[in-house]
Image (cartoon, helix red, strand yellow):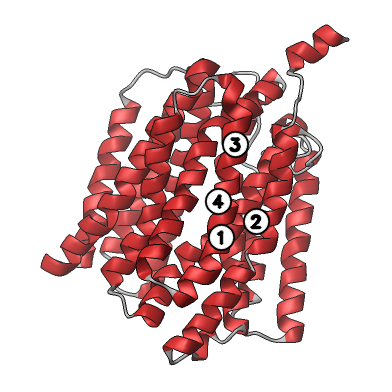
Amino acid sequence: MRYGLRRPMSLAALVFGLGCLLSSVAPSMPVVLSGRVFQGLGGGGLVAMSFVAIGVIFPRRYTARAMATVSTFWGVSAFLGPLIGGFFVEYATWRWGFAFFALQAFGLSVWIALRPDQAAPQTAVRNGLPLKRLALLCLAVLMVSYGGVGIGMVQTTVCVALGIGCLALFLWLDSQAGHDRLLPVSPFDFRKPTGSALLMILSLSLATIAVTAFGPLLVTAIHNASALTAGYIVACSSIGWTVMAVLVSGSPERLDRLMIALGMALVAASIAGFVYAVPNGPVWLIAVFAAMEGGGFGMAWTFILRRTTALADPGEVQRISGAIPTVQRLGFALGAAYIGIVANASGFTVMETPSEAAEVARWIFLACLPFAALGLLAMATLVRGHPTPAQYTAQR
């Protein structure tokens, strides 16, 4: 809101490119990981600003089609990414792969910088970078993650408790920040449309990260599949997301609630399917459930932003648009940390046989079901009838 769209997006692409470049010349693994940090910062900025751009530039009736376009590129990249990476590893070196994506990002940064800005800066906004709150958010994820590094009753409990405490403190500080808030008012209050939408996204992101974080390795260990096959099973999720998003993008606004409900129900059903399919197979069934998970998100995601912004105060639209991908990635990070604890506690680090790996897989995906149930509860609140702010004013 302070700088418009063009400069932050161009800067985010530049940061992503610098991260790729740093990884490509890295002499050691810590330097590779440092590059990955910058890739995450730049990539997160690009994704969040893209959501903001959709909410700002396009009229609400075009939101679904704009989101479907984003989903299309998401699916294409999920398919081409492993292919391009595999090409460089097979025929050249992994360093050239990072360098290739660095050049792509630098070109994107220049292209964005030269375009006109369709969302003018708001000179009245004077908020600075909320370093304290961002540090608390990162610390919350790191503490939960560290709780799973060495499983122990005291260490794990203390680390998880500290992580939850940091997250609670972040939410409290953010609620006191007034116009400088990162998230909307009452961001996870499931009694309100915005809160229920963000709680749904957080919960289902927590519940679905397991197949991305552990799926390829478990499929390889249990079913003796190749690494490429395992990778493309996970890519089925992005492909399903893309196909479904395109198919439903023309649905009228009166069907938003139905699409959200059906989509989230498919996501929850896919998690239950993984509980059986990953330990027992066959491999094609795992791919089917991965496509179902992505298809459910694709069916609903296109309409979550449209419905949530329609029910929000006009002054909150940009903040909500940015909060949706931010909360999704927070869910992925916390979910990976949580599933890491479950995996290590169930014997992931010592498994040697396919049967032991299958038992670990069963516990991992069972641990996802409570968050899937919470996501469905929040979804039920989001899709029930709510008056828009204009309708509420008229009623008064």
* Badge number at residue 260: 3
- x%, y% of residue 372? 65, 56
- Check whether the beta carbons of the residues at disc 1 and disc 2 lie within 8 A of each other: yes
Residue sitting at the far top: 394
The residue to which callout 4 is attached is: 267
Q: Secondary structure at mark 4?
A: helix
What residue is shown at x 72% (from left), y 40% (from top)? Answer: 380
* Badge number at residue 372: 2
- Going from N to C along the chain, the mark reached first, 4 or 2, is 4
For marks 4 and 3, give the CA distance: 11 Å
Residue type pointed to by label 1:
Ile
- In the displayed structure image, the side of residue 117 where residue 125 appears, left or right: right
The residue to which callout 1 is attached is: 271
- Check whether the beta carbons of the residues at disc 4 and disc 2 lie within 8 A of each other: yes
For marks 4 and 2, give the CA distance: 8 Å
- In the displayed structure image, the side of residue 382 where residue 47 appears, left or right: left
Q: Quadrant of the N terminus?
A: top right
Mark 2 neighbour density, 10 Å: few (under 14) some (14–19) many (20 or more): many
